[in-house]
Amino acid sequence: MAITKVTSKSSQVAQSIASPVNLSKTKSQTTILCEELIEIQLKLESIAAAKLTKRADEIKKALQEVMNESGADEDQPYVFKTPAGTVEFGPRSNTTEIIDKVTMIKMLGMDTFKTIAKVGITDLKTYLSGAEIEQFTAKSKGSRSIKSVKAAE
């Protein structure tokens, strides 16, 4: 993991991360965080966390289908009991959605609506071509994502 933006105050920290040989007896906060992240990543890889999370989500969806098909009261918790233990789902939550956008805009006023409205680019792609979208959008740099976390060999 490399640091790409270095200020005069953090140059020593960057040096210590880039060159482990130069580490002093006391570790910088950045070094401590990097080491903790490496340790967590190793633990996650050892238990195949991504695969387990995906499988857990699949199982939850399958159990939700069982609940839906059972005709159980949606306002009450639903419990699956097995010899290994129990799995409890809470009651269905209430959701609110806008069903009359014209009335909402009238009540807010167009200026307020323009201030708070958020339209996703993915949603726009359903209705407009890429060239059309480019006419009123601007690209900028987003956040960085970690490409790899590797332990020292």
Image: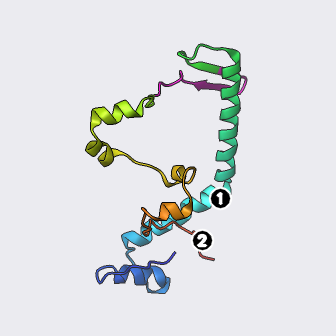
> Quadrant of residue 13 in the image?
bottom left
Say which residue appears at 55% left-offset and 62% top-offset. 130
From the image, tell me which residue sits under label 2.
150
Q: Percent x, y for residue 61?
A: 67, 33
Query: Badge 1: few (under 14), some or many (20 or more) residues near its Cα, within 10 Å?
Result: few
Say which residue appears at 53% left-offset and 23% top-offset. 92
80, 96: nearer the viewer? 96
User: Can I make out residue 89 in this image?
Assistant: yes
From the image, tell me which residue sits under label 1.
45
Circle 1 SS class? helix
Q: Percent x, y for residue 64?
A: 65, 27
100, 10: nearer the viewer? 100
Q: Earlier in the sequence, mark 2 or mark 1?
A: 1
Would residue 57 be found to the left or right of residue 37 on screen?
Answer: right
Q: Name the residue type under label 2.
A: Lys
Q: Name the residue type under label 1.
A: Glu
Say which residue appears at 61% left-offset and 56% top-offset. 44
Please state the extent of the stretch shown in magenta in the rendering.
80-95
69, 56: nearer the viewer? 69
Name the colour scheme: rainbow
User: Can I make out residue 81 in this image?
Assistant: no
Would residue 147 be found to the left or right of residue 95 on screen?
Answer: right
Would residue 111 be found to the left or right of residue 6 on screen?
Answer: left
Q: Percent x, y for residue 127?
A: 55, 50
> Quadrant of residue 63 in the image?
top right
Circle 2 SS class? loop
Pointer 2 with pointer 1, Cβ within 8 A:
no
Magenta stretch: includes residue 22? no
Q: Residue furthest right?
A: 83
Distance between the Cα atoms at labels 2 and 1? 11 Å
